[in-house]
Image: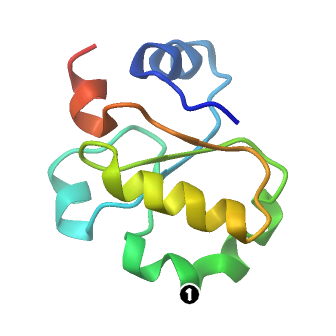
Amino acid sequence: MTDITATELKDRLAQGTAPVIIDVRETWENEESRIEGSRNIPLGELPGKLDDLEDLRDTEVVVHCKGGSRSASAKAFLQQQGFTQVRNLIGGIQGYQQV
């Protein structure tokens, strides 16, 4: 699945059609700034949380971090685990905050 732009995500949030959003930054980063409605699962904890995410295997999920690197790793990991609709937020939360 193709990645998502900050503009598209903001539009979808405004329309009430937002996908599931997972913030893979560390908890302290999430506490400083977050996308409304997102769920914080730090990248290092993601493998241990797979059971909690089982119902999202065929659901659109957007992963994000600060700039896009950690979330690219999270996207690849989730796809390897059989998640079919994972998208990375292009530019991360930094890009999101600039739109």
Q: Is residue 62 above or below residue 74?
A: above
The residue carrying mark 1 is 48
Q: Amino acid at mark 1?
A: Gly
At label 1, counting other C-alpha atoms closer than 10 Å, the crowd grade (few under 14, some 14-19, many 20 or more) is: few
The x, y position of residue 99, in whole percent, is: 28, 13
Q: Is residue 22 above or below residue 40?
A: above
Residue nearer the viewer, 51 or 88: 88
State the image quarter where residue 44 is shown. bottom left
The x, y position of residue 84, in whole percent, is: 79, 51
Residue closest to the far bottom: 48
Residue nearer the viewer, 72 or 43: 72
Can residue 39 be seen by looking at this rendering?
no
The answer to whether residue 88 is left or right of residue 52 is: left
Can residue 25 be seen by looking at this rendering?
yes
Residue at 26% x, 68% y: name it: 26
Q: Quick one: SS at disc 1?
A: helix
Q: Is residue 23 above or below residue 96?
A: below
Residue at 32% x, 38% y: name it: 92
Residue at 59% x, 80% y: name it: 49
The answer to whether residue 19 is left or right of residue 43 is: right
Q: Is residue 66 above or below residue 3?
A: below
State the image quarter where residue 79 is shown. bottom right
